[in-house]
Structure formats: C-alpha cells, structure tokens
Image (cartoon, grey):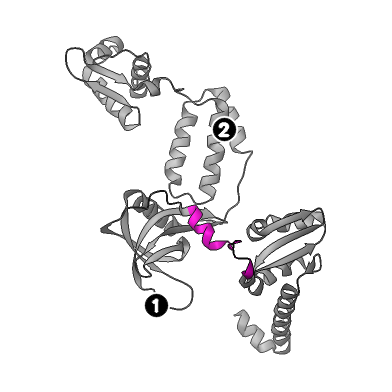
Amino acid sequence: MTKSDNMLSILWMLRSGKRMTAKQLAEELEIHVRTVYRCIDSLCASGVPIIADSGPNGGYSILSRFTDSPLFFDIEEQKALIHASIFAKEAGYPYSDDLTRAMDKMMRYANEKQLDHLKSHSTALSVIYPRTDGVLQLNLQMLEAAAGQGRTVEMQYDRGKGEDRLPRLFDPYGIVFWKGNWYTVGYCGYREELRNFRVDRIRSLRETEGRFERPAGFSAKDHLLDHLLPNPTEPAQFETVRIKGKEQVLNELCHHWLFGHALVERMPEEAVFQLEHSMLKTYVPYFLMAYSTALQIESELLIGKMVEANARMLAHYKAMLANPTRRKEDEQ
C-alpha cells in the first residue's frame, strides 16, 4: 500500500475509539513499525489530533471531538469550498498557491462522479477583480504573518502627495479586503495612533525584532469602516438629500457603498440619503456625473457643487480644444 493508504487505514482504525500501540497497528496492516511512526507524524502534521499515551496501557488515540465529526466533506460542502477558493484567489488572497494545493488534494480523492460534478461547478462561477501583482501578494503574506505572530514591521508608505517615504514602525492588527482593495489596520509608530493603509501603496516592508499585542476584541474590519463611513450620530455635519429617478437607476445608486450606508428612506422612484458635508463638496458630485440627466436632486448644496464641478470640467476640455498643441503634450 502507498503511504496515503496506510495513513487513511490508521486513521480509520483510531477513529473506532480504541487505543492502539504502534506494534498493534503495524501487525494489523502488515507493515513495519517505523512506517507506522512516519504515518502518525504525517497525520499529526496534517492537523489530526492524535494523542500518544505511554505506560502499560498506552498507545495512540484520537480526541473524541474529532472522531465525532465527519471525516470527509459531502459534495455540496466540496462545491462550496471550490467556489470560496475562486473568490479568494481572484481577490488576491495572499496564500493562493497553498489554496490551490488544498483544492487539488480534495479533487484527487474524489471518485469519477464527484470529480465530474466538482469540475462542472468550478467552471460555472467566475469572479472579476483587479489583477494582483506578485509584490502585493508578498506584502500581504508578510502583513498577515506579522499580525498572527504579533511582530512589528518597518514600512515605507506612499501617500501619493510627492512626499518623502519615511520609514515607520507599524504593528499590523489585521488585513481587510474591501471594494477591490486590500488594507492593513494597526498602530503606526510615526503618527502614534491607529491607522489604515492601502497595501498597494506600500513601497517597502521588512520584519523587525519588535513585538506587540493586539488589543482584546479589536476588529480591523470595524475600525476601517468607522473611518471610511460618516458618523450619523453627528447630524450637524450632514445634509438630507432626496434623489428621484427610475427604479433601476436608484437601485444601482443604492448599491454603491457610500449611498447604501447613507440611505434613510426608499420608495420605488425616490431615495433619501443623509450625506456628510465633506463628501458632498468633494466626492459625491463627481460620482453622480456618471448618471448624467437620469437623476432629479433636491439639495441646493449638492446641486451647487455639481454645477461647479461640471463648469470646471467644461472649461478644462474647452481649453484643450482651443489649444491643440497643449492637448498633444498632455496626451504624450
């Protein structure tokens, strides 16, 4: 028998609940006792909770909670794992190679009918995300490992403002995938406060000998969202915006992360939002330009900002038409 067959046989024998010695296992399977030891080591490395008791009544056994659980995934669980792996890999999951090996193992031990079923479902689902480069994946691996081990890293971060990328010590509490981008959340030694950083803007990253302890109950996801989304408990900073349009158009608008979280009332062809003033003056007017004349907006502040934004855009492109030479230089 192959090593995998021996391992599976030992696993089934120990799942019976009996305590067995290496000699008993070897005799039962007609293999050398050293082969039993190697198989036991491999099973333990795979995560099987095997207990070795010494003494006259000693031997190997498996924790009862493991023997009570199913040894194999059923076909629907296997399908769910394959679909989850597709999402993870397309999102730039930092351990995609390991995930692929795990899926290959599961497929390897499926029978012909199960294999056909899994292959058909693995091609039935696709996910489109921005492509992740190798440097980003290496940084994600280092940040995840540092978060799990409580290890401080040294980071150079590009804020995109032409500033010098000063090295800073950073305690990564976790990594978060949100809206097509990876973020890391943790304590920044340079600012001496909790900060969020886009991982794709990290220019260099290295481990240090420093150690840290993540605050009990800390959630990197919640911290990131708290800083990206406005706080509705401060109404003085908010504007009520009523937007009318066709139901399908409003559905699309409400699916956007900012508008979806700011929605306070919805009718088939009307939606009411509580939007922060800073968003109305900067981000929101440019986003709504994509809807052209499909929306009717009831907010003097927002309408005024959209008029200003459109006027600046109109003046910009008129100037390009009036100066072809400059337009060619800009294109180059």
Helix, strand, or loop for circle 2? helix
Mark 1 Cα within 10 Å, few/some/many (few <14, many 20+)? few
Nearer the observer, 318 or 62: 62
User: How far across and how far down the image is residue 33, in percent?
Assistant: 22, 17
* CB contact under 8 Å: marks 2 and 1: no
Q: CA distance from mark 2 to mark 1?
A: 48 Å
Q: Which mark is residue 79?
A: 2
User: How far across and how far down the image is residue 57, in percent?
Assistant: 21, 12
Q: Quadrant of residue 327?
A: bottom right
**Over which residues does the magenta segment extend?**
221-237
User: How far across and how far down the image is residue 313, in percent?
Assistant: 70, 80
Q: Which mark is residue 89?
A: none
Q: Residue at x 48, y 58 (%)?
A: 183
Please check the rendered image and state whether residue 176 is part of the magenta-colored stretch, yes or no. Answer: no
Residue located beneath label 1 in the image: 164
Which quadrant is the N terminus positioned in? top left
Side (left or right) of 71 relative to 74: left
| Secondary structure mostly seen in the magenta stretch | helix
Side (left or right) of 307 relative to 89: right
Q: Is residue 53 above or below residue 297?
A: above
Nearer the observer, 310 or 187: 187
